[in-house]
Image: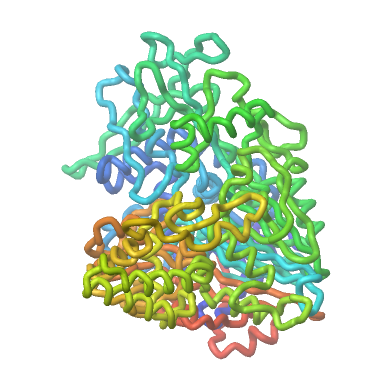
Amino acid sequence: MSSPGSSAAYDVDICWTTNGVPHITADDWGSLGFGQGYACARDRGLGIADHVLKVRSERSAFFGAGPDNRHLHSDLGYRVLDIGRRAAVAIEGRSEEIRALVAGYAAGYNRWLEELDRTTLPDWCGDGSWIRPIDELDLSAVYVDLALLGSGRNLVEYLGAADAPGVGDHPLPPPMPPAGTDLAGSTDHGSNGWAFGGDATVNGRGMVMANPHFPWHGEGKLWECHLRIPGELDVYGAALVGCPGVQIGFNDSVAWTHTFSRGHRFCVYKLAIAPGAPTRYVHGGAEHDMVATEVEVEVLGADGERTAHRATRWRTHHGPVLNLPLLGWTSDMAFSYRDANIDNDWFLEQSLAQCQARSVPELAESYERIGGLPWVNTLAADRDGRCWYIDSSATPALSASAQERYDHAVDTDPLVALLAGLRVALLDGSDPDDDWVDHRGAPAGGLVPFDQLPQMHRRDHVFNANDPYWLPHPTEQLPRHSPMHGLYHRPLGARTRANALALAGHGVIRPADPDGRFTPDEVERLLAASESLVATELRAPVVQRLRRAATDSALDTATAQVVLDVAAVWDQWDGCFTLDAPGAPLWREFLAGFDEGALTAAGPLWSEPWSAHEPTTTPRRLAPAPDGADPVVVAVLAACEALAAARLEPSSTLRQCQWAWRGSVRAALPGGGEVEGVMNISMPVGSLSRADLAPDDPPSGPVPGRTERTGLTEEGYRITYGASFVMVVSFDDTGPVGRGLLVYGQSDDPARPEHADQVDAFGRGALRPLLFRDEDIEADVSLRRVRMRGPAR
């Protein structure tokens, strides 16, 4: 057993293999952290520095108040959350192993900083004076923030701008959320995760497919690595940038992946304000004073001088007060919020326990014992053929009556429904029965305990594609749980239905095994096929409808010819969003001609609506043509006009119009979106809201009415979100066998080959071996080894 920490110098061996993947080996936890911190900073160090600056509440000190005061709002908001104090508390509660890892990680980052050539910094870094050495406390603050990725991290600007009405001389205007995002930070977080048990694989062992859809820019990016301490740890996978360990990956006995949970990580409370007293609120029939908190940050002025900005912010027994966009804080109404992850000190402990688990039961035991995952579902399988699904995210615990009221209010209260659509649970802040309930065995007060979490153990397969917990298997449902885990028996997205049907053997790639058992190669090809479920179900009847409509005397000759041309394109299309399939972009724009409700209900598109009794096979059948204008024809003609605005034809392919910048490389990408029912997500819309300083790529000219919906611009679809770390891992008699890649590459530096060297392989559906065994690492043609020593600890 190695010592968690000592006064000796850090000592680590790093081998880089194809695509710049580091294999990091050390004899102790501090040295392992040192190697991982150095290797990650070498690839994504500026992102780590930016994240530290943000949680230090120092962006305004170096970059001024920012556009629309966004830096100032953010800095004040993080002061309101008291990130620094929470980070210090978290450090004290961690194991020696985790503390050594984090301290080593900081030392590794600082080693990279010593080597940094500041003359090559990108323009957005300014003079780079803000890029400074970090320590264990800085990284701990980053981890507090990452735990809040599905909650408070997206609310900091509303916290920072929460001036009480009539109190203070210089109120800040409420910020508006970034375009295309909701108050939980995204329109549609997306991921696909499959875990196969031995009954569903040809060799009778477990298998996992990981396809997390994470942003291609900013925070939340993943980084690939292999970490080893002989006799204690041997794990391969993807880590959140700045985090030690591996968050998605495998060891020699277990593989696991995560998908973003559709449940709630926080609750917003609507407060009744006492008459004439904006900082008093009513709870349980009595008036209560809000508690004032003084916060202060430095702001760089136009004259180059820094001045102190002081503000008073307020909190209730629920938590801090928000200045929500459009709703604000008035003389009779305000909003406060409570966060399930605000004191999540166990995130890293849980991550390390995952990395060391020897079986699915052992992994489950660690979830019950630690309960540290903040905002994800887990899909896991082991070499003995067990598989498991759980949404173990930190979740508010409500009384049964509060659950029932909220479930009812979503359908009857317009404001509750509006915020639910933005992935926010709105509760009555004046009713004590809406307060969170404490449970024995929960990781913290007010949270759901392990034995009440939605989960399913099986030996065939489980899956999740970001819809709520209740359908983790194509044919077996979980019973109703709290609506804080997600709404029960509400319409599923087309991508979830596509996942379920693919696992049931009804995808474009079907198992050759007569019993429907999968091989790793079939899983790999199924994901790469980019089949559109909606096209599979509707393409043929739409083609027939268009050909009939072309003979309608109501259409002029030119319009009829356009309709016939579209029918001809789709008649030859296979319904997949691969690079060279004519008609895929046109199908995306065609579906954008229908409102969101029409995508699941009976109406202009579907004849039969979605049903909870047949959740994976409804909605179905094309709706019959109505008298008068045919909505199918109308949507087709509008789609053609939209593509024409981007100088595209009905027969255009994704290779011609769907792309991502990787440095100077404009890389074509396959894949589609949620609406089309494509599992392989590649989209210009739907990412996490950005909270980093790096600028977006130059915008393209918008296509009115389309850019917001499908991301179409005059230059096509510029991908900013989708497949990130793709992994298929199975087990044989000798251990794990993995294939995968990190689509957007290991490095953020456009000048390095590792910035763009994997995106083309993803376009071809060509995963590479994930090198786990010594002999495979040593045989790699790109092998480069460095032994590093660091300072004494």
- Horizontal and vertical percent position of residue 297: 35, 35
- Horizontal and vertical percent position of residue 715: 26, 70
In the picture, measured across the screen, residue 330 lies left or right of residue 672, that is left
Q: Is residue 312 depicted above or below 88 in this figure?
A: above
In the picture, measured across the screen, residue 215 lies left or right of residue 341, that is left
- Horizontal and vertical percent position of residue 720: 39, 64
> Which quarter shows the C terminus?
bottom right
> Which quarter shows the N terminus?
bottom right
- The residue depicted at 77 percent of the width and 67 percent of the height is 197
- Horizontal and vertical percent position of residue 326: 33, 33
Q: Residue furthest left?
A: 303
Report the label total.
0
Q: Quadrant of residue 240?
A: bottom right
Closer to us: 625 or 472: 625
- The residue depicted at 34 percent of the width and 72 percent of the height is 661
In the picture, measured across the screen, residue 586 lies left or right of residue 100, that is left
Q: Is residue 658 depicted above or below 212 in this figure?
A: below
- The residue depicted at 17 percent of the width and 43 percent of the height is 302
Closer to us: 540 or 686: 540
Q: Quadrant of residue 56?
A: top left
Residue 109 in sight here: no
Residue 101 in sight here: yes
- The residue depicted at 42 percent of the width and 55 percent of the height is 604
Colour basis: rainbow
